[in-house]
Amino acid sequence: MGSYHGAESCELVVVYMLNLLKRICGDTIGLYRDDGLAVSQGPPRTTERVKKQICKLFADKKLKITIEANKKVVNYLDVTLDLNTGKHYPFMKPGNVPSYVHAKSNHPPNIIKRIPENINQRLSSISSDEEVFNKAAPTYQAALDKSGYAYKLRFNPKNNRKKPAGQEKEISRGTTHPST
């Protein structure tokens, strides 16, 4: 962590750990750098047993992990997933204020042009419906306005794919920590 090749090393460790975790969790787990997310259809007791196996696996590799198991609502990266309502919506850590490259900056014009479109696409894809989108959009719209963009964010449902309803599942979230 903090080394010149930290991000690249992290990616290698993630691939290695996913391979080991697959033996415990199958394909119901994903990792991104130091965040992970797993889905369990088993009862809470089984999920707790799997949690202990995962903690042991990380400890054996001299890595620390924090796991919150048997949750119905979880913040993962920039999305909140809510199994109670079936909705997903944008998540931002408290105090975080988005900021973007200014529209008049010296970046390539194609990059500048795509920034607001990409923000709109991402916001639409992590919003389960237009109501959720409209609730989150003002923060992102203010950041775009401040950065000099004349772009109005609008919900685009084609970026939002509905998944078929399935059995109720539990979510477990883990965060790895560097060993000290």
Image (cartoon, grey):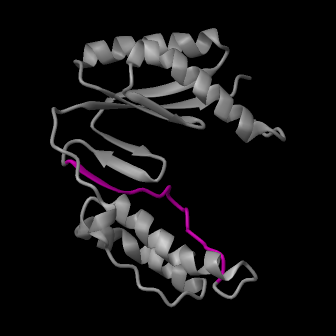
Q: Position of residue 43 (x, y in %)?
A: 22, 18
Classify residue 33 as left or right of residue 79.
right
Closest to the observer, 112 or 70 = 112
Query: In what quadrant of the picture does the C terminus appear?
Result: top right
Residue 4 in the image: above or below residue 116:
above
Left or right of 17: which side holds 171? left
* Magenta: main secondary structure: loop
* Left or right of 149, for residue 122: left
Label total for image: 0
* Range covered by the magenta-colored residues: 86-102
Residue extending farthest right: 4
Percent of width and height locating residue 169: 23, 31
Residue 48: quadrant of the picture: top left
Quadrant of the rendering where the N terminus is positioned: top right
Q: Residue at x 23, y 47 (%)?
A: 163
Residue, x 82% and y 38% (percent of image)? Answer: 3
Q: Residue furthest front?
A: 110
